[in-house]
Amino acid sequence: MSAVDKAFHGLRHMIATGRLSAGGRIPPEGELCEELGVSRGSLREAVRMLAALGVIEPRHGSGTYVSQLRPEDIIGSLSLTLELLPLSGLLEVYEIRRVLESHVAAQAAARSTPETVRELFALIEAMDATDDPTEASDLDHRFHAAIATAAGNPALASLLSVFRARSRKYQIFTLPEGERMRRKSDEDHRVLATAIADRDPRAAAGAAEAHVAQTERWLRAFMPPMEEDSPA
């Protein structure tokens, strides 16, 4: 085990056992280096790694603290690895997404409010009105995010956001068959939003599962290339 790994797992153990609690300040570098048997450089690298995972928060001029360890923040850090998946790997996790999207749709229907319904149908109208695939993709993401938020579980919403962020890298609506698929997707959105408006959890769950399954079939059939990010 390298010195960096030793420092990483040592800090991780302190947090996991509660010795370093959520929101608490971690001990001075000198004390930690002595206890863990590592150099300051190795300790700092371990802190950077844990910060990338949302576990530790360096605060300028104040010190370094354990984060609040909110589940949604920790789960959100999965994007660091899930965004490395090729399409073939992403398709393997689509079964998880189908289950979770179905669950949050049912919960959103059970908790449906007029505000949520208005937001969903406003997003659908915006999707219908745009011809820009990038804007349509963003609106689609916001539509599903609104449903996940309405379900009332921030951790689930965070996990689904990670899944969707990777899925958006593979655009099917820019393909020659894209317009036909987009019309079908828009129809699915209306069915799903209507079920939520009707406060019908079973219909909402079925609509969400069917919608995600259809997207998965399109991805498997066309295997679109990954959209590259624009240079900064």
Image (cartoon, helix red, strand yellow):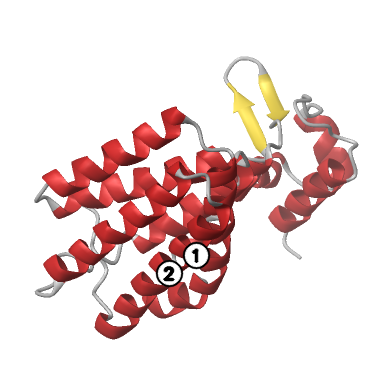
Amino acid under label 2? Ala
Apparent side of residue 99 relative to residue 120 in the rendered image (left or right): right
- Name the residue that disc number 2 marks: 210
Q: Is residue 81 visible?
A: no
Q: Position of residue 35 (x, y in %)?
A: 89, 41
- Count of marks overlaid on the render: 2
Residue found 84% across the figure and 46% down from its top? 16
Judging by the rendered image, the residue that carries numbered circle 1 is 206
Check contact, mark 1 vs mark 2: CB within 8 A. Answer: yes
Q: Residues within 10 Å of mark 2 (few under 14, many from 20)?
A: some
Up/down of 25 relative to 19, above or below: above
Question: Where in the figure is residue 230, as x and y percent of width and height?
Answer: 19, 51
Tell me the kind of residue under disc 1.
Answer: Gly
Q: Is residue 78 above or below residue 173?
A: above
Q: Where's residue 190, x and y in %? A: 31, 52
User: Eyeballing the image, is 180 above or below 200?
Assistant: below
Which quarter of the rendered picture does the C terminus lie within?
top left
Q: Which mark is residue 182?
A: none
Mark 1: secondary structure: helix
User: What residue is at 26 percent from the left and 45 percent from the top?
Assistant: 124
| 83 on left or right of 59 | left
